[in-house]
Image: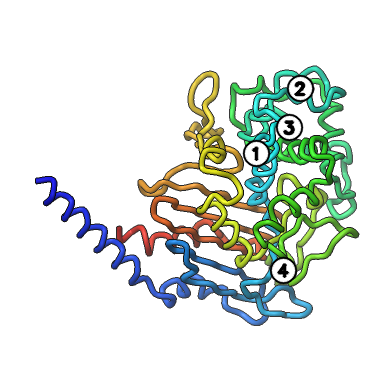
Amino acid sequence: MKIKLALLAGALAAVSMNASAQVSGSQIDAIFAPLKSTTAPGAAVVVIRSGTVVFRQGYGVTDLRTRHLIDSQTNFRLASFTKQFTAACIMLLVREGKLRYDEPLTDVFPEFPAYGRSITVRNLLNHTSGLKDYEEIYEKQLPNTPPEKIPQILDAGVLKLLEQQTSGEFAPGTKWEYSNSGYATLAMIVEKISGKPFGDFLRDRIFVPLKMTHTLAYEKGKNEVSNRAFGHTKKESGWIETDQSPTSAVLGDGGIYSSVDDLAKWDRALREHTLLSETEMKPALTPVELTGGHATSDDDREVRYGFGWFLSPYKGHKRMWHDGETIGFRTTIQRFPEDKLTVIVLANRADVNAEEMALRVADLYIGKM
């Protein structure tokens, strides 16, 4: 009986692999066909199956001035896709014994107000810190000021804003609330503990070792983005460039630029555990649990979030994923580790639902399993 079951399982696995192998480039290409253009912004896509890039394509142009065609080496602003890299920096420091996940914020920054005593590094990583939204605080300090007139704020400025507060929104660990403030603070923790600027730590400890040679945390006046895609928004009059906002210079929550070629290297590192071991990655892939039970969003849906990764399954398939959304850009990484499938979509136009498109690609594979 056991032999028959084993044979049946082997046969089913063979059928599954054969079915998934039948996914053609033309099927994937059809999903992104509306983005084909030589005069409009678009997107770059990569699909990785069992460690091999099986589809890689660019659509549209990087900007409306040069009209350079987007390709696999075009660098896009990742927005909140960045958070998994910020989390990885913290995890490297924890591995080296320089930081603890349960270390209070005030241990790192003694000058931080008393309400930071109950906020841990872990709270910052899994969005349970209760820190107030720095964007709201910043906007309130500059009332009636058009966005284009508001100076860009940096991670250090975010920390100063939070140090001006006397309390958080809720007791740490009792609620889940997505927090850009938390990830800007994590970037400053990396700087304080490592003694290096956050962008330099990213470069030296992640990008260079993984040979992500064109990926960087963009800092105006300090470095330049090669093969850069600029963000765009469609108005009634046509496309307009919407590339930078007052918060675009904050690095920890969304300041990295990368390409699908470089992100394929990141995916390989995650798959092969070349940067962080499977054991070291476990906390990042463990859904947060609140002191009162499971984490929920404002509409009472259960939230499964680790360190820089959403962990909600898709159609019964285990998934780790994250979207990025900022002025003029939409990005996503959708990883299905048990199915050995990754889909990454980077778009430089605000009207694209990158996650939806990526999941349509995933459906071509997992729908046949």
Residue under numbered circle 1: 91
Q: Is residue 126 left or right of residue 194?
A: left
Task: Tell me, for residue 229, which label it has, or none.
Answer: 4
Q: Is residue 181 above or below residue 341?
A: above
Quick one: 138 or 285, which is closer to the camera?
Answer: 285
- Tell me whether the residue at label 1 lies in contact with that at label 2, contact meaning CB atoms closer than 8 angstroms: no
Disc 1 from disc 3: Cα separation: 10 Å
- Mark sitting on residue 116: 2
Going by the numbered disc 2, the residue's amino acid type is Gly
Q: Nearer the viewer, mark 1 or mark 3?
A: 3
Q: Nearer the viewer, mark 1 or mark 2?
A: 1
Q: Earlier in the sequence, mark 4 or mark 3?
A: 3
Task: Give the structural element (helix, strand or loop) at label 1.
Answer: helix
**Disc 4 and disc 2: Cα gap in Å?**
38 Å
**Residue 39 appears left or right of 3:** right
Label 4 neighbourhood size at 10 Å, few (<14), some (14-19), many (20+)? many
Spot occupied by residue 37 in the image (x, y as percentages of width and height): 61, 79
The image shows residue 78 at horizontal and vertical percentages of 67, 56
Q: Is residue 149 above or below residue 72?
A: above
The three-letter code of the residue at mark 1 reads Met
